[in-house]
Image: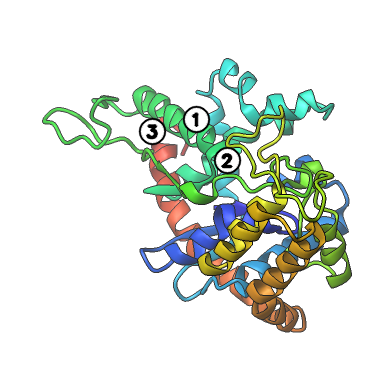
Amino acid sequence: MQSSGRLHLGNYYGALRQFVQLQDEGEGYYFIANLHALTTVRDPKAALDLTREAAMAYLALGLDPKKAVLFRQSDVREVLELYWILGSVTPHAHLERAHSYKDKVAKGISPDFGLFAYPVLMAADILLYSADFVPVGKDQIQHIEFARDWAVKFNTQYVPGYDPADPEGKERGHSRGILKLPEARIQEATQTVPGVDGQKMSKSYGNTIELFGDEKEIKKRIMSIKTDSTPVDAPKPVPQQPATTPGLVSDAPLYDLLKLMLPESDFAEVDATWKAGGKGYGDYKKKLLEAYHATFGPARQRYAELAADPGEVERILQDGANRARAEASRLMTQVRKAVGIP
């Protein structure tokens, strides 16, 4: 699993909350995607700072290094080797139709090699640790499908007796693939989190609410959430699902964020007054700000403690890298033998 840069509500509700929950189900591998980040972060100091901040965020939000493996992506160099080998069986046409690539190019981002080949590195991240399943948002399903497709292509090419219809080699005469086919696990209730403008919350869109940002900036962001001109006394429009406006995931992001963050009983009260009228959007934004601090206050305090002890953060990352490399080396021994690399 991965993340890079400063984490926001979309990262937490779309993935990170699941990561913390899943660490009790089995061994999980969680990495800071500092290689992926190079497609957009070109300042070396910023790259180092963002990597450290992401690690502190994971730990502050509840990731337990005794249960899970937390590491920097770049500390496991095997991922780059698998990236190249996997790329040798990746169809050019697949990369051309990658949602992330097409979306960024449409927004004017330069289509360099890093952006174009991004899904191959992501697939290598997944396949290197023989993941059983990968918790993702709906918009990330294509990446899991790519990883599965390319694993099948690799296995078909390099594993004698491999049958794509029997990837685990359960039938007599069939071989088990070297690269395991992962499954996507989707958290239906929080597949896509709206940003302050109603689009999907994303650093690329500049519409995020950060988890560990400055308090004044957090308040400014929440108070700037897009609303309409409905009078205070009038009922407020409930968002349509899906949003009726092209490019938006929510016609009323404030309502959807309240529904996401408030306890069920508290949201029921908000929902009743929202539909009846009598309160202005400013009141609801203050309610959301209160929910933000109630939810993330303890994590923000833990984050500050970790920031004061960088040596402990580095120790955790190094230990995680050692554990991750042990697993990666095991797989790459098989991959190298299969393709004829000593």
Please tell me which residue lies in front, 315 or 340.
315
- x and y percentages locating residue 88 in the rendered image: 54, 24
Amino acid type at mark 2:
Met
Q: Are marks 1 and 2 in contact (CB under 8 Å)?
A: yes
Pointer 1 local density, CA inside 10 Å: few below 14, some 14–19, many at least 20: some
Q: What's the residue at 32%, 29% (across, down)?
A: 159
- x and y percentages locating residue 3 in the rendered image: 64, 53
Amino acid type at mark 3:
Ala
* N-term mark: 3 or 2: 2
* N-term mark: 3 or 1: 1
Q: Is mark 2 on a helix, strand or loop?
A: helix
Q: Mark 2 points at which residue?
A: 122
Pointer 2 local density, CA inside 10 Å: few below 14, some 14–19, many at least 20: many
Disc 1 to disc 2, how far (Cα)?
9 Å
Q: Is residue 102 left or right of residue 123?
A: right
Foreground tag (3 vs 2)? 2
Q: Is residue 74 visible?
A: no
Please tell me which residue lies in front, 105 or 158.
105
Q: In this view, does 230 lie to the left or right of 36?
A: right
Q: Is mark 3 on a helix, strand or loop?
A: helix
Q: Mark 1 points at which residue?
A: 146
Disc 3 to disc 2, how far (Cα)?
21 Å
- x and y percentages locating residue 167 in the rendered image: 27, 32
